[in-house]
Amino acid sequence: MDGLIELDSDIELIIDGARIDSADRDLYKKMKKANVKFIGYGIESGNQDVLDFYNKKITLEQIRKAINLCNEMNFITRATFILGAPFETKQHFEKTIKFACSLPLDIAIFRPLNYCPGAELWDEAVKQGKIMKNEKLLLQVQKEVYLVLRQRN
């Protein structure tokens, strides 16, 4: 960020794929000075057991603090959420949606879980007979739901 600040450019920047656990006030102040306008996160869930299943190594409290810091810095924020971990229930889905709505996000995207060859979830699905061992590709029609959670002035 220091190098970008030195350039003193008027180019607006997007940070996509930011990590919740790297949210830091001093870093975000530098990002603001460097003309970052948008930050996107893969939050995945509003349930700690699902975050642990995905091995996200973050907590709901860390998520809340990071998104609140982004809001304070006036960044446009987007978060993606995955619905459909193998053990998720309707209550998990509802809790994730309520959690997303409780955050000062500008955009929330909800996607169904996709299995990717070579991933642990893929291997487990093969073991359980959900996917054939010789399958090379599993296509799932993806419908994305976008929610604009607040309007900026």
Image (tube, rainbow, N blue to C red):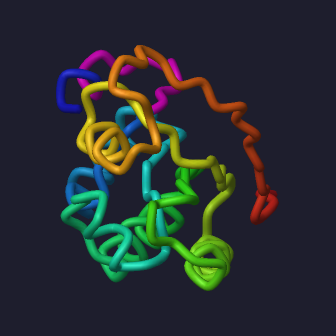
**In the drawing, does residue 6 fall left or right of residue 116?**
left
Q: Nearer the viewer, residue 48 or 104?
A: 48
Instruction: Answer above or below: position of 145 versus 12.
Output: below
Q: Nearer the viewer, residue 35 or 114?
A: 114
Residue 35: image quadrant is: top left
| Residue 41 locus on image (x, y percent) | 44, 49
| Residue 17 locus on image (x, y percent) | 38, 38
Q: Residue at x 38, y 70 (%)?
A: 50
In which quadrant of the rendered image does the N terminus lie?
Answer: top left
Q: Nearer the viewer, residue 82 or 138?
A: 138
* Membership of 12 in magenta stretch: yes
| Residue 68 locus on image (x, y percent) | 47, 72
Q: Residue at x 25, y 27 (%)?
A: 118
**In the drawing, does residue 112 fall left or right of residue 31?**
right
Q: Which residues are magenta?
A: 5-14
Instruction: Answer above or below: position of 61 versus 134.
Output: below
